[in-house]
Image (cartoon, grey):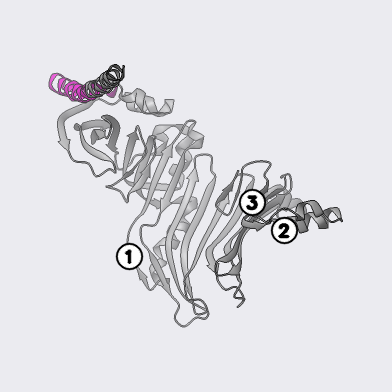
Amino acid sequence: MKQKVWLIWFLRFFGIVILGGYLNLQAGASIEAQKSELRGIVSKKAQYGLSEIPRFLNKVPIPAPVKSFFEKFRVEGSQLFFEDSDIEGALGAFGVKGFVRIDNVRVPIKLIFVEMEGDITEIILIVDLPVNWKFARLGSQLATLDKGIQLTNPKLILSSFEYEEPTFHNVEIGMGVNVISAIKFIGALLPVQSLVNNLDKVAKSTSKGDIYMVGHILKPLSKATFTAFLPQEIVFDLKNSKPIKMIDLKKFFIEITASLEAKMGLTMLMYSTKFKDPIDLKAFVTIKPNEAVFSGALNTMFDPAFGIKWLALGDFGLDVDLNYAVLASTGLPSGFGARGKMNIGTGADVRKIDIAGKAGVGQGLMLSGKIDTLPLFLVVAILEKMVGAKIPVIKKIPNPILRNVELAVIPEDTEIAGKEYE
């Protein structure tokens, strides 16, 4: 009987090994089949459309107005290539290099099949756009961007997956349609360009570089986002100033949507004569058609705080909402939000507390509180104060420690100074 059982398990294991090997061969053959299909298209046709490449346009999510733009492409002068890939997790790449005509200008195009682990291929299409190319070519809803942004050496990238583009500042490319380019701000955004151009006059140390942008075009087009970055790190040397002696601007960005919402933010380290470690600051301004939100976050713990050895404070965040209608009628902000952390105690006996709250006109009250350790006797003491009576039964119970205690009243998903509460 035992021999029969062992024989059954052996056959099952052997069958799984054979089946796994068969599936791997089939997966490998599918990659070879894709290569064979490309060879056939390139060798037999002097020109072909992207729709003739199997599974391509259907695999990448593309808004309808943008899809019609790509469906007009006729690829010519094609050459096959096989190469290594710098994309994280990629085992290699193959595809086609060629040319297409956009606005009667012949521009390079590169279709890349990225080989990933598990015999999976992802697809990337990179198109070099003409010098005078405009956002309006992808849809009238994007035409407003042409009034504030001038593109330099723009590229369109279609991708079936999310990855970091190694040839362009390692920007994050999203699934779908993306635009990357060096840019200049014009028109209504010209003051921003002037500010960037004059940074070297106020900063003691800065490396030169163009502003660059990555855009992610979604369905519908009104949800598209375009984010501009400064590639350089900028240092403001304030040696003769007290208490701030230096500001190191790590990141500065401007995010604009096709529906004319804008967000500006910066991340910096501030070095003070009063603190040993640098102060990590983040600041954001979000501008919407009906309101503006100002946010600031201090991502540093002050330990000790105010010279008190058993107290540490930090990770503060503050939001101020300015609804234009409320501001016009009352002269006051329409909402406030705040968050912060507190450590109480010394050595191993430290309790960590995380609190947040937000309220405003037309908003539900949001409260959130967390504590990592809470002795039961303290909970009992609070309950006794609330009910106005002793609780002798509970006092007979051994005094355990409650961990990761959380109290939250969150009517809807809320963001306070860049931190989300759900």
**Residue 42's spot in the image, x, y percent?**
16, 24
> Which residues make up the magenta segment?
23-52
**Helix, strand, or loop for circle 2?**
helix
Task: Give the left or right position of residue 295, taking residue 188 as reference.
Answer: right
Taking the spot 50% from the left edge, 39% from the top edge, the residue there is 258
Label 3: state its secondary structure. strand
Q: For the C terminus, give its image quadrant.
A: top right
| Amino acid of disc 3 | Val
Magenta stretch: residue 320 in it? no
Comparing 306 with 291, the one in front is 306
The percent position of residue 139, horizontal first and vertical second, equals 44, 32
Which label's residue is closer to the chain start, 3 or 2? 2
- Dot 2 corresponds to which residue? 377
Mark 2 in CB contact with mark 1 (< 8 angstroms) = no
Q: Amino acid at mark 2?
A: Phe
| Residue 8, placed above or below residue 97 | above
Q: Which residue is mark 1?
A: 207
> Please, which residue is most extreme toward the bottom here?
240
Query: As drawn, is 275 to the left or to the right of 320?
Result: left
Q: Earlier in the sequence, mark 2 or mark 1?
A: 1
